[in-house]
Amino acid sequence: MDDAVVRAELAQAHAGSGTRYYRGQPAFDDILSETARWATTAPSPGAILTGRLFARREPGSAIGSIDIVAMLHCNITMSALLPNAPRISSVDSLGCQTAVLARNERLEAGRAVVLRKASETALHRVETRESTRGILLGIALSGLHKRDIVVDGRTRSFEFTPGAIYLRNFAEPYRAELLNGFDFLLVEMPATAAEGDPAEARALEALPRLQAETDPILPHIAAALLPALGHSQTVSTLFVDQIVVAIQTHLASRFGDLKPPGRQRSLLSHAQEARAKEMLANRLQGDLLVADIAASCGMSRSSFMRAFRATVGTTPHQWLIRQRIETAKALLHDSRVSLAEIGARCGFADQSHFTRVFAARTGVSPGMWRRGG
């Protein structure tokens, strides 16, 4: 890249300047990536800033330098002046360069976030600063992934086979070199995830750091989220939240000091059962959290989930789906109501989603059911 000038807009970057020296093309690429991270993660003073990145190498020499200059936002950005100039790729909240991700899928349930990130190539350095975001669980889905991770100031190498997990706390800074491609399911759980259950909250807070650990249960629990990630528009908050709660309870029991529940099954009282079903029936879209229902019953999330299943025979989400179908059957008797309207009333994303779920549960389409078939 002799005599090359690379300029990119740095939006919401912290004002600053400096000169960094590099030797050779790999180091130059590393500095570009580092600068992109700086632009994305640095605190903003509140004003939009536009920056220029100049990279140059002396002819015939492997030594070069980079000057980073951030300045107040101007009306004409560098990208407008140089539309064909190379662009610095953006970096997401986990430090991944989004431009090289082959998969970048996301689901949310309250403050919990489920992600699938995959790349066919190495990402080199991935780095996040310490924060109060909670804990991150990663589950390798395929292949053999290798990464070097800085642990207690020393770099250690790890290999992730399918099903291997890692667990880290966002309260600690993270820095790793991703040496080859990867495919991971990631679950970001807030520090307040187990509010209402002091024992589980303490167990989650004290979870150890894990790298390339094996667990016979977590990959199977998390596998239920994979189809949902590909159809995020049809997935309810309640469904995602149920699985996240199951993951958190397993982590607290398997790797924390949370004692497993006793063999004696606890049941919901009649009042608690009625209250839980009322909340679910009033929110057929499934846009509520397990914690909301549990709190209305005066219970922790994990205790409520166990008691609901023991009492009703299904999970809250399964009961919700059944209620959607029963409500749809009643509405189908009125020929004046369109299938699209019935689907919307019953909490389905669209008519196609309604038809697919109805047929899977009853064996016939809504139209055939209406015609008496």
Image: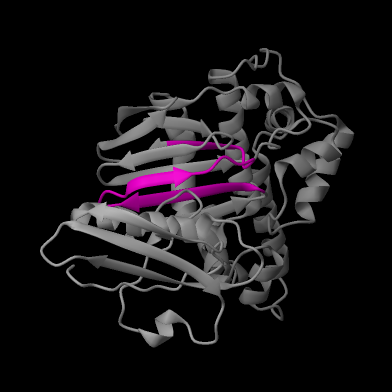
Q: Name the one closer to the observer, 316 or 361.
A: 316
Residue occupying image coordinates x 70% and y 78%? 337
Say if 52 sits above or below 363 in the image: below
Residues shaded magenta = 111-138
Left or right position of 167 against 329? left
Q: How many marks?
A: 0
Quarter of the image for residue 12 reads bottom right
Q: Is residue 118 above or below residue 83?
A: above
Hey, which residue is sitting farthest right in the picture? 271
Front position in the image: 187 or 88 = 88
Q: Is residue 125 left or right of residue 131?
A: left
| Direction from residue 117 to residue 231 in the image, left or right | right
> Residue placed at 43% from the left, 50% from the top?
116
Decide which of 239, 23 is in the foreground and name it.
Answer: 23
Tell whether 341 sits left or right of 25.
right
Work out whether residue 141 can be spotted: no
Place of residue 66 in the rendered image (x, y in percent of width and height, measured from the top left): 33, 62
Residue 322 coordinates in the image, percent (x, y): 65, 50
